[in-house]
Image (tube, grey):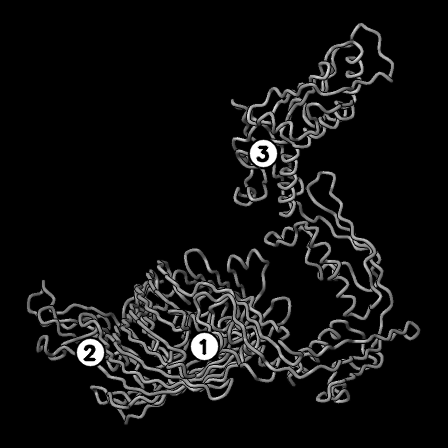
């Protein structure tokens, strides 16, 4: 950037001022400050003859925006006062320091001083060019210059430095910023910052010098910074960050201290930019030192309720074990929590180290200083603008006046987090009260949106085209109530549901809620490739009322009553026949067309059931747990009125373990059994049928057990169509067509099932977490079985329909219909189903096992889940599927 006579020339200006003033003083011409005049022909005056005198007048010229008095106010020059060369020089410096002027000159005409100024221009606008990786909303807050401000070089340089620093924080150390000034009329300018972002600086190599006990690869694995490699294309740790360099030094020290090297230190850590200024090479020089073992370890307690000898026996480290600094830190935390359990919130636990370099041992004495027992003075809740105080307070396990208990404080924090109303970074701070034995529990919450409006459309491998709309408010009116309504439509299911839950009815610890719903399900079976047809349609209209009460802190009981009206139908044109030809009134469900299990399921039924759930839950967060366990026992008794009678028992269990570094391991299991309370049932032909109807049974498949298709596990009837072939001897026979084009597959469900899953959630970088990506690997296993074997047709010649009456009868031979029409040109019957045979498969409790990888993604289009799973163990009849996904709907 260029500017005429800017402040950068101030030093040479002062020297020029001194010389020209001396010449002008002797020659009797005006002295020029700032710009040297041409040498006068007169001989130079001796150094002693310096200009001076009294200021007879002061005049300001050249100003545009400033008043003359304002310009003079920045100097110490005043009319009637004496002046010297030094005072003129100081006036120049004072005016330049204001950064209001591009050029300043002071002329002396025998005491008549003229201050000639040229004002700095006014900034019209700030323009950014070339920034693609960083948007303007990230850069502009760093720029201090603004329109209508006075332009100065120093401010421009400062803004350039800020922009470059912003790019360096993003790992772009090759970024450059070139400021340019565009001159406009009326002494205005546009400031243009031309930005060359350059590539993101990566860490090309990490060198470690001085390590003998551990290899470079093992030490690099402890660092957050990673070497740039092709397989780390999505990692954010390969970018150079000087703050991360200091953090990695601390990580190295922590690693060595956990391995017993108490004297370890990092001598130096140097990051060098490669010659092409693209990447960095980091070099660590370390000194490992000797490895120590634990010496004598004990606990000394000055608190009467805590026995030092008893606590010593609980210490995890023993004499002779390798020294581990992390274990020492954890022990301090554990002892502090133990003191907190007895009400000593401010107990001070200090480890005293006794290091012996002779025998390389580290003795530790954990001292618990005396402290008063503490009581809760009050509970403060800050930050809640919508949520009422009582919603948070009722989750506290401590109240004013209670003895402090650190375990109950942690439990309170977990319960508040489980509400899902606040950001996850919630903490309960412990602050001193009005007396040494008083404590204030301060909870600073940050509310998040609890209302959800979801309008989505998508495609699911299970339900094809999907439209879903739902409105949920989990903190209705700020009282913690949940109000929800949803509408879902897909090719095979439709539902409308409205529900409401009051977690604390009448401010008592009793949850009360209810749901009203209408659900329509079109069950399907596979035909041609992925083509499917509808087998039965089930319409359910009903409601449920539920209530829940806690029994203990971790055990609760929930009661419910449900009333459902079901109507199950089959397509009459497809599955009905008129065996006696009596017309529409004689139409009956034809087992040859539909199968006995479907014919048995049709009809209208009323299910009136009462049930309970016994819940044991110690999870730290019910929404996204990381530790703890859960067990739920459910039982429903149908038969309190209605036409359906059964007892259905189900259980669910789960346990979560944090593995460190963000990994979470979980084991989950569930199972169920349904027992009929009805007597024997027979179909229209008098044959015994299963007493548990098709629509009340358990089904298993995707998404419960991945690696299999929807309802792809368990009892099923497969119908294979036959094709005539000519044998070598000229005879004919029929062979089974086992491709999907020529068979149907009907899942029947079962009366008993079980399902187990082991899953590890894999942490990703901060960028992936912000995108809502949560990958996991899993193993699923399960089975469903326990039916009375249905009657299947081992061989059928086919089904024919009378052309005139529509009556359906078996073919007289394979694929040949009876023909009683005397007209040889007209057939009296038409073949509608060719010869076929049926097979009953899958009714076994042998486990089906699948292993796979899945990713949850909270995409802009709605929740998305994709699973890639391989079925390792399966039984004949099971339907496997490698890839399944859902988008635009909950899963």
How many residues crowd mark 2 within 10 Å: few (<14), some (14–19), many (20+)?
many
Mark 2 element type: strand
Whether the residues at callouts 2 and 1 have beta carbons within 8 Å, the answer is no
**Residue at the spot x=71%, y=58% of the render?**
247
Circle nearer the N terminus (2, 1): 2
Across the whole image, how many numbered discs are drawn on residues? Answer: 3
- Give x and y (percent) for residue 782: 47, 78
Location of mark 1 (residue): 875
Question: Is residue 104 positioned above or below 521 on the image?
Answer: above
Q: In the image, 103: left or right of 767?
A: right
- Foreground residue, 518 or 96? 96
Label number found at residue 193: 3
Quadrant in the rendering for residue 733: bottom left
Q: CA distance from mark 3 to mark 2?
A: 81 Å
- Foreground residue, 405 or 581? 405
- Give x and y (percent) for residue 871: 49, 70
**Residue at the spot x=27%, y=78% of the render?**
542
**Residue at the spot x=26%, y=76% of the render?**
540
**Residue at the spot x=62%, y=75% of the render?**
433
Circle nearer the N terminus (3, 2): 3
Residue extending farthest to the top is 41
Task: Specify the quadrant that holds the N terminus.
Answer: top right
Mark 3 element type: strand
Quadrant in the rendering for residue 340: bottom right
Q: CA distance from mark 2 to mark 1?
A: 31 Å
Label number found at residue 589: 2
Circle nearer the N terminus (3, 1): 3
Task: Specify the quadrant that holds the C terminus.
Answer: bottom left
Is residue 724 among what the camera can see?
no
């Amino acid at each position: 950037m260029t500017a005429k006579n800017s402040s950068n020339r101030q030093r040479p200006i002062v020297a020029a001022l001194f010389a020209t003033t001396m010449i002008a003083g002797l020659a009797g011409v005006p002295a020029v400050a700032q710009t040297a005049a041409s040498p006068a022909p007169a001989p130079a005056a001796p150094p002693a003859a310096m200009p001076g005198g009294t200021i007879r007048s002061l005049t300001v010229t050249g100003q545009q925006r400033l008043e003359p008095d304002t310009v003079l106010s920045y100097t110490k020059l005043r009319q009637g006062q004496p002046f010297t060369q030094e005072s003129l020089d100081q006036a120049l410096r004072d005016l330049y320091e204001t950064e209001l002027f591009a050029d300043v000159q002071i002329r002396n005409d025998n005491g008549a001083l003229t201050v000639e100024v040229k004002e700095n221009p006014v900034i019209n606008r700030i323009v950014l060019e070339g920034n693609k990786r960083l948007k303007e909303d990230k850069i502009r807050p760093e720029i201090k210059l603004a329109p209508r401000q006075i332009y100065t070089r120093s401010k421009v340089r400062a803004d350039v430095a800020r922009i470059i620093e912003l790019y360096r924080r993003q790992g772009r150390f090759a970024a450059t910023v070139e400021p340019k000034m565009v001159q406009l009329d009326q002494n205005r300018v546009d400031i243009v910052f031309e930005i060359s972002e350059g590539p993101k600086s990566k860490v090309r190599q990490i060198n470690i010098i001085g390590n003998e006990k551990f290899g470079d690869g093992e030490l690099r694995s402890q660092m957050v910074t990673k070497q740039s490699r092709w397989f780390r294309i999505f990692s954010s740790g390969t970018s150079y960050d000087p703050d991360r360099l200091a953090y990695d030094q601390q990580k190295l020290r922590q690693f060595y201290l956990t391995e017993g090297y108490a004297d370890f230190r990092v001598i130096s850590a140097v990051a060098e930019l490669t010659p092409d200024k693209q990447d960095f090479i980091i070099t660590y020089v370390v000194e490992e030192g000797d490895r120590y073992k634990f010496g004598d370890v004990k606990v000394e307690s000055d608190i009467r309720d805590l026995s030092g000898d008893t606590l010593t026996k609980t210490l995890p480290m023993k004499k002779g074990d390798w020294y581990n600094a992390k274990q020492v830190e954890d022990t301090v935390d554990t002892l502090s929590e133990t003191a907190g359990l007895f009400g000593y919130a401010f107990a001070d636990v200090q480890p005293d180290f006794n290091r012996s370099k002779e025998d390389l041992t580290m003795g530790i004495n954990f001292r618990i200083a005396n402290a008063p027992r503490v009581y809760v003075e009050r509970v403060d809740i800050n930050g809640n603008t919508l949520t009422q105080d009582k919603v948070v307070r009722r989750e506290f396990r401590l109240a004013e006046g209670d003895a402090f208990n650190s375990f109950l404080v942690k439990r309170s924090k977990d319960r508040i987090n489980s509400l899902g109303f606040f950001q996850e970074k919630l903490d309960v701070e412990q602050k001193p009260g009005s007396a040494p034995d008083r404590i204030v529990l301060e909870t600073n919450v940050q509310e998040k949106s609890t209302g959800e409006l979801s309008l989505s459309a998508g495609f699911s491998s299970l339900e094809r085209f999907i439209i879903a709309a739902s409105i949920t408010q989990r903190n209705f009116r700020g009282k913690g109530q949940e109000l929800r309504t949803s509408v879902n439509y897909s090719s095979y299911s439709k539902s409308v549901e409205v529900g409401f839950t009051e977690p604390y009815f009448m401010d008592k610890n009793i949850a009360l809620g209810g749901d009203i719903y209408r659900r329509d399900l079109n069950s399907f079976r596979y035909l041609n490739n992925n083509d499917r047809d509808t087998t039965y349609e089930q319409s359910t209209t009903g409601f449920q009322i539920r209530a829940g009460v806690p029994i203990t802190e971790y055990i609760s009981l929930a009661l419910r009553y449900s009333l459902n009206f079901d109507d199950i139908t089959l397509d009459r044109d497809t599955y009905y026949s008129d065996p006696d030809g009596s017309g529409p009134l004689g139409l009956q469900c034809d087992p040859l067309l539909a199968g006995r299990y479907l014919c048995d399921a049709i009809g209208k039924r009323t299910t009136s059931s009462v049930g309970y759930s016994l819940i044991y839950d110690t999870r730290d967060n019910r929404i996204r747990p990381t530790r703890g366990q859960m067990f739920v026992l459910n039982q429903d008794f149908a038969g309190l009125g209605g036409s359906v009678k059964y007892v259905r028992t189900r259980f669910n269990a789960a346990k979560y373990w944090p593995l460190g570094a963000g990994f979470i391991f979980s084991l989950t299991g569930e199972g169920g059994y349904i027992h009929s309370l009805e007597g024997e049932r027979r179909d229209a032909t008098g044959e015994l049928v299963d007493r548990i109807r098709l629509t009340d049974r358990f089904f298993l498949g995707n998404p419960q057990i991945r690696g299999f298709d929807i309802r792809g596990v368990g009892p099923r009837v497969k119908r294979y169509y036959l094709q005539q072939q000519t044998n070598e001897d000229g005879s004919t026979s029929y062979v089974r067509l086992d491709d999907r084009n020529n068979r149907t597959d009907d899942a029947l469900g079962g009366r008993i099932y079980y399902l187990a899953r082991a899953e590890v959630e894999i942490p990703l970088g901060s960028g992936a977490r912000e995108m809502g990506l949560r990958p996991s690997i899993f193993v699923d296993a399960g089975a469903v079985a326990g039916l009375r074997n249905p009657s299947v047709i081992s061989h059928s010649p086919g089904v024919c329909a009378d052309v005139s009456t529509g009556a359906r009868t078996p073919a007289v031979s394979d694929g040949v219909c009876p023909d009683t029409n005397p007209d040889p040109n007209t057939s009296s019957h038409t073949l509608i189903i060719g010869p076929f045979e049926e097979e009953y498969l899958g009714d076994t409790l042998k486990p089906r096992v699948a292993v796979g990888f899945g990713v949850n993604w909270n995409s802009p289009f709605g929740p998305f889940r994709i699973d890639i799973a391989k079925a390792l163990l399966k039984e004949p009849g099971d339907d496997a599927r490698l890839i399944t996904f859902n988008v635009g709907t909950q899963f």
